[in-house]
Image (cartoon, grey):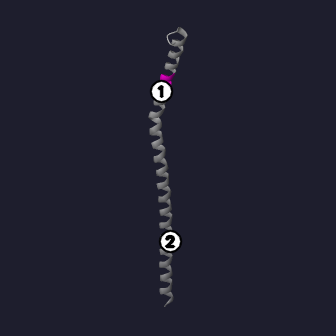
Amino acid sequence: MSDTADLNIREQIARIDKTLAESDKLREETRKFAAEQHKLAAEAQKLRLDRWLAPALTFVAVIGGVLGVASFIARVTGWAH
């Protein structure tokens, strides 16, 4: 082969190597993005659960407190034997 053809092949190989390296970099960025998206989706699901769970637990605690006070008053006043 001539020196020009050999140089042309080397340039093409270098471009192919560069393209492959860029593709690998993009694949890694895509993998990281997907992992981050999965993490954020899980966190959003947890926050949706917490949004209704906290008021529900507060309501149950208040009802428990009211029933406890009512039971105490019933025992003190003699309503409950």
Instruction: Tell me residue 34's x, y (percent).
Output: 46, 55
Instruction: Tell me residue 62's x, y (percent).
Output: 49, 23
Name the residue nearer the viewer: 21 or 68. Answer: 68
Q: Predominant secondary structure in magenta?
A: helix
Local secondary structure at mark 2: helix
Q: Label 2 crowding class (10 Å Cα cut-off): few <14, some 14-19, many 20+?
A: few
Check residue 18 in the rendering and tell me which mark sits there, or answer none: 2
Looking at this view, name the residue that lies furthest to the front: 81
Tell me: residue 51, above or below residue 72.
Answer: below
Label 1 with label 2: CB-CB less than 8 Å = no
Name the residue nearer the viewer: 63 or 10. Answer: 63
Check residue 80 in the rendering and tell me which mark sits there, or answer none: none
CA distance for labels 1 and 2: 63 Å
**Dot in front, 1 or 2:** 1
Check residue 60 in the rendering and tell me which mark sits there, or answer none: 1
Tell me: residue 60, above or below residue 19.
Answer: above
Which residue: 47% across, 46% down?
A: 42
Given the image, on which type of amino acid does mark 1 rest? Val
Q: Label 1 crowding class (10 Å Cα cut-off): few <14, some 14-19, many 20+?
A: few
Local secondary structure at mark 1: helix
Label 1 or label 2, whichever comes before in sequence order: 2
Which residue: 52% across, 9% down?
A: 78
Span of residues in magenta: 60-64
Residue 24 magenta-highlighted? no
Given the image, on which type of amino acid does mark 2 rest? Lys
